[in-house]
Amino acid sequence: MTHKKSSNRKLLRGGLKSALVHNKSTQPNSELLQTLKFAVPQFFEKDVYDENGNLVKAGDFKVDKFLDELKSNDITESYDGYKLGFIGKNYARLQTGRLPETMIVPDIKHNSQNENKNSKNIFITGDNLEVLRHLQNAYAGKIKLIYIDPPYNTGKEFIYNDKFEFDDEKLKTALGYDKNEITRLKSLQGKSSHSAWLMFMYPRLKFAQKLLNDDGVIFVSIDDNELANLRLLMDDIFGEGNFVSNSVVITNRSGRDYGGIAQTHDYLVIYTKNFGTELNMVEEQGKEYDFYDEKGGFNLMELRNRNVIFNDKNRPNLCYPFFVNPNSNDENNLLEISLEPKKDFVEVMPLKSQGIQTVWRWGKEKSSEHLNKEIKGKSKQDGNFMIVQKSRINAKRQRSLWDEKEFVNERGTESLKELFGNTSASIYFSYPKSPHLLKRIIQLATLPDSNDIILDFFSGSGTTAHATMQLNAEDNGNRKFILVQLNEPINQNNKTQSVTHKTIDEIAKERIKLAAKKIKSEKKSTLPEHFDGGFKHYRLISPNVKTLDKIIKFDPKSNILFGTNIIEQFSYKKSKTKGQDTLFTTWLIDDGYSFDTNIDDKVFGDYTARYVADARTLYLINPNWNTKALTELLDQISKNELAVNTIIVYAYSFDFESIRELKTNIKSNLRNKPDVIERY
C-alpha cells in the first residue's frame, strides 16, 4: 500500500484530544483553508506546534499576497455572481472543517469469521457525517463510484438529526450570527424545510467530492421535492462543468395514484469529479454486427469527439490531421489512412461544431498503433471523409430515460422477499432500489478488473453491496464496497410481523450475508476464485463526556494505571472488541491508512506493539511498557531487523518517566532516529 499524506495529518498528531481542541476553533472557511494550504502553501504562514506535536496556531492565510497574485495574472473576482444561498449554509460549511470525535470499533467476532477475515469489503454502522470525516485521510481520492439514495424530504423529520455542536457564543463568533439568526438556525434542526435539507446534505456532499478519485463519478437518487435544490447544491460543490445528466428512472410503471399526475419516476443526478470523465458504454443484447473482417464482426463509431467541451484549446494533443486515400476501398468500403501526408491522400481534421474546433478521442500515439487495423477512413454522402473506429462490442450510450422493467422498485421488493421471505425485513422498505438499477450504475462507472471502490453512505437495505457482489460474480470483477448506515430502528407498528432485526443496519448486514450465500449457490460452477462475499464490520461510538473530561485532566504521576481504565472505556463487549483494538483502528484510519492495510504484531519482551510495515510506523498503545521492552526495541532497530520512521505512543498508557526514557535512548543510541509522537 502506498501511504498518501493528507493535508490534515499534522492536526491529528495529538489524537482525540487534539481533534477536540481543533474543533473548538473551527470556522466556516476552515475546510477551504486546509484545501488551499495543501494546494498553494506559499500563501500561508508557518504552523506553530508545541513540544508534543500538537498544533498551537495554524499559519495565517496571506490574503494580500494571494490577491496580488490574482491581479498580476489579470484574474478578477466577481462579487455579484450567481450563487447558492440558504439558511444555515455557513453552519454547514463549518461542519466540513471539523475532525471526527468518535471512535471506530472493529467487530472482532464478525471480522474473524472465515468468510470475513480476508474480505476487503467494509460495512460501518454509525452517523455517515462522522464516518465521512474519518474516511477523509484514508480514502481521499480513492473512491471510483459513489451512489447515494438520501432522504427525499417528503415532509417527515429526518432520522439523521445532526446535532448543533456549539453554544450560542460560538455561533456568534464563528458565524457572525445575531440572536435572531441563531434562533432561526436552531429551529431548523430535524425539520423538513428546504434550508434544513440543504444544511444536512452540504457537508456530506462536500466530503464525498473529496473522496472521489480523479475519474470518479457520483450518482444521487432523488425525487421532485429537492431535485432543483440538489442540482444547485451539486453545481456549487462539484462545479457546473462536471454535470453529466439529470436522468429519469421509471420506478413505478403504474404510477403512484394520487395528486394531479400519477408519478412513475424518480431521478438520477450524475456528476463527475473532474471535467472530461466519460461513462462506460452499455452492451446491447442480441444486436447483429453490420460489418465483418478477419477478426470478426464490428460496427462503426466516429473517432471524433462530438462534445465541444473537448476542443483544441484544452485538448491540443487530440487535434491533428489524418490523411485518407479516396481510392482504396476494402471489402467494407472503408479507406486506407495515414498520419503523414502522401500523394493523392486527402487531409481530414475533426470538424468544427458551433464554431469550435473539436478533437479526436484518441491521441496520435494510440492512433498510430491501430492505423488501418481498428481505425480507417469512410466516405460521407457530401463527398468529404470521416475517421471511424471498429467497435467490436455491441454497445451504446446509456439513455437519459432509464425505462427498463428491471429498474422498477418492485424488483427491489422482490429481491428482499427472495432473501428474507415475507418478514419485517422485506416489508419495512417502501421503495427499495432494484439491484438491477445499481448493477447498471456500477457498470457505467467501473470496470471488472480495476479493484474500484464503491461507496454508499445511505446504504438502507444494502442494495449496493448486493449489486456489487452479483456483478462481480457475473463478469469476474474485483470491485469492493464501503457501506455506511445509521442504526435506525425499524418501524414496529405492524404487530402481525415478527421482528428479527431491530435496526436498518442489522437488516443490511443480514442481506449481504444472504445475498452472498445465494450468489455462491447459483454461480457455483462459474464463480471466480477471488469472489469476495464477506465484509468487515465496524461501529462508531462516542466516548462519554466523563471519560473525555478525565482524559484531558489526567495526570500520569498520580495514577499511572489510569490509562488502562480509559482504554477500557473504548471496549465494545457485543463484538468482543478490546479498547486497544478500537483506539488502534481509529488511529489507523485517521492517520491515512485504509481498513485493509497489512498490520503486524511486534513483540518486545512481553510487550506487544502494532506495526505498519509499508509506512514503517510503530504504535505503542498497551500499558506495561518496561525497560526490557525498550532495550529490545532499540536492539532490533539498531541491527536493522526493524525499520521504524515513526513511533506513536498512547501517553495515558505510559508514565512520564517511561516516555522520557524512550525519547532519550532513541536520541542517544540510534543513528536513524524515529520521530516519537505522543497522543492523548
Image (tube, helix red, strand yellow):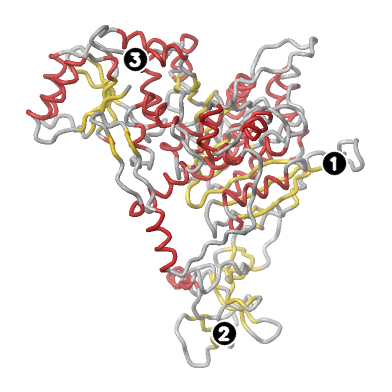
Q: Amino acid at mark 2?
A: Ser
Q: x and y percent of residue 24 in the render? A: 44, 30
Give the secondary structure at mark 2: loop
Q: x and y percent of residue 637 in the render? A: 14, 29
Say which of marks 1 and 2 sits in front.
1
Q: Is residue 601 above or below residue 148?
A: above
Q: Amino acid at mark 3?
A: Lys
Q: CA distance from mark 3 to mark 1?
A: 59 Å
Say which of marks 3 and 1 sits in front.
3
Q: CA distance from mark 1 to mark 2?
A: 56 Å
Does the residue at mark 3 contact the one at mark 2 (Cβ under 8 Å)?
Answer: no
Q: Which mark is residue 328?
A: 2
Give the secondary structure at mark 1: loop
Say which of marks 3 and 2 sits in front.
3
Report the residue at 77% width, 28% height from top.
Answer: 430
Identity of the residue furthest to the right in this view: 260
Mark 1 — residue?
Answer: 263
Mark 3 — residue?
Answer: 553
Would residue 415 appear left or right of 3 to someone viewing this image? right
Q: CA distance from mark 3 to mark 2?
A: 86 Å
Residue 48: quarter of image: top left
Q: Nearer the viewer, residue 70 or 275?
A: 70
Identity of the residue furthest to the left in this view: 669
Query: Which comes before the other along the chain, label 3 or label 2?
Result: 2
Q: Amino acid at mark 1?
A: Gln
Q: x and y percent of residue 254 in the render? A: 87, 39
